[in-house]
Image (cartoon, rainbow, N blue to C red):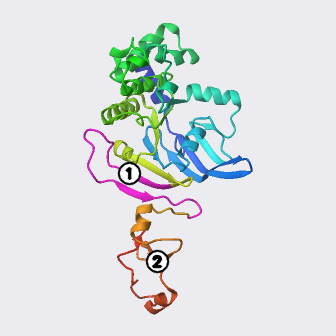
Amino acid sequence: MTDLAALQARALARSAPEPDEGLIVCDNLVRVYRTEGVEVQALQGLDLTVEAGEVLAVVGASGSGKSTLLGILSGLDLPTAGRARVAHHDLLAMKRRERLDYRRSTVGFVWQQTGRNLLPYLTALENVTLPMGYARIPRAQRAGRAMELLDLLGIADCRDRRPGELSGGQQQRVAIAVAGANTPRVLFADEPTGELDTAGGEEVFAALRRTNAELGVTVLIVTHDPAVSEQVRRTVRIRDGRTATEVLRPSAGGAGAEAGGAEEYAVLDRVGRLQLPREYTERYGLHRRVRLTAEPGHIGVWPDRAAGQDAAAGPGAQDPGEGEGEDE
């Protein structure tokens, strides 16, 4: 068995789903920051489940809580309340040493800034082999395993180049190889194409999908760019520290992806809160208060009307704004 085949077998064995829940589970997750007497709620009861083997994008604008979520899931930050589990690890209960081991062996990282991913004075091959030492992989196996990872991502010819001699897309693909060197169960990518052109971005997304398919690594991409949803099957959008909507596609992006056909879902949390996309609320004039009607098989959501207008319509009458509201 080759080094890469052994790597794949180990990753697939470790990616078995948790009993009765996903590989990543966030349940009513809260993160509150206090600075100079000011309290900021970065996460306000966020719920998220990611199944083993998924490639998922978490999309949100600046201040939505996506960076806070990534910091918690990666073990770099602690939530204030709620539950966060990744591959059997309770992120609220881990001790400092356990957190360090978690970051070294359970999760891998690809950051937007290449300076955080690669050491500039090491070659691509040396960068990939470096984390294998922390995992106590025998020295004799490291170079062969690293070369197979670089080959898998189409950059074997870059093995002897330093980061400054690589394009941005090549640097990020080497970073993906580094992140996968210790067969993590989850690979986190923070704006991995934020500094790349379109062609370089396509190469990086293809590399992430290949890593997922060949090594069985669950991939979670955090970004502000909604266009990333075209590159993955499932996109979760967060807004104001809560899970807002999900977009599901019949197949992953890239070559062969089906044009259109994506469906968007609002997420209903455990206490019944629902966030409607802004484009819907603006289109139908939904502000502050809306009127609900029980319809056969669904709920109608209508713009608020004057009390007299509602009374005149009567409880059984057709809503005067029908066709303008949003049905759920």
Taking the view exactly as shown, the residue that stands out farthest to the front is 36
Q: Which mark is residue 248?
A: 1
Would residue 22 be seen by someone viewing this image from the given angle? yes
Tell me the chief SS of the magenta region.
loop
Name the side, left or right, on which 47 lies relative to 257: right
Q: What's the residue at 62%, 26% (across, down)?
A: 101
Structural crowding at the residue carrying mark 1, measured as other residues with C-alpha within 10 Å and reported as few (<14), some (14–19) or many (≥20): some
Measure the alpha-carbon separation of dots 1 and 2: 27 Å
Identified at 47% across, 82% down, the residue is 305
Residue 1 point in image, percent of width and height: 39, 15
Residue name at image x 55 percent, y 29 percent: 106
State the quadrant of the C terminus.
Answer: bottom left
Residue 207 position within the rendered picture, expressed as x and y whole percent measured from the top left = 36, 30
Magenta residues? 244-272
Residue at image location 59% in from the left, 63% down from the top: 271
Q: Secondary structure at mark 1?
A: strand
Judge from the rendering whether residue 33 lies leftward or rightward of residue 242; answer left or right: right
Residue annotated with mark 2: 294
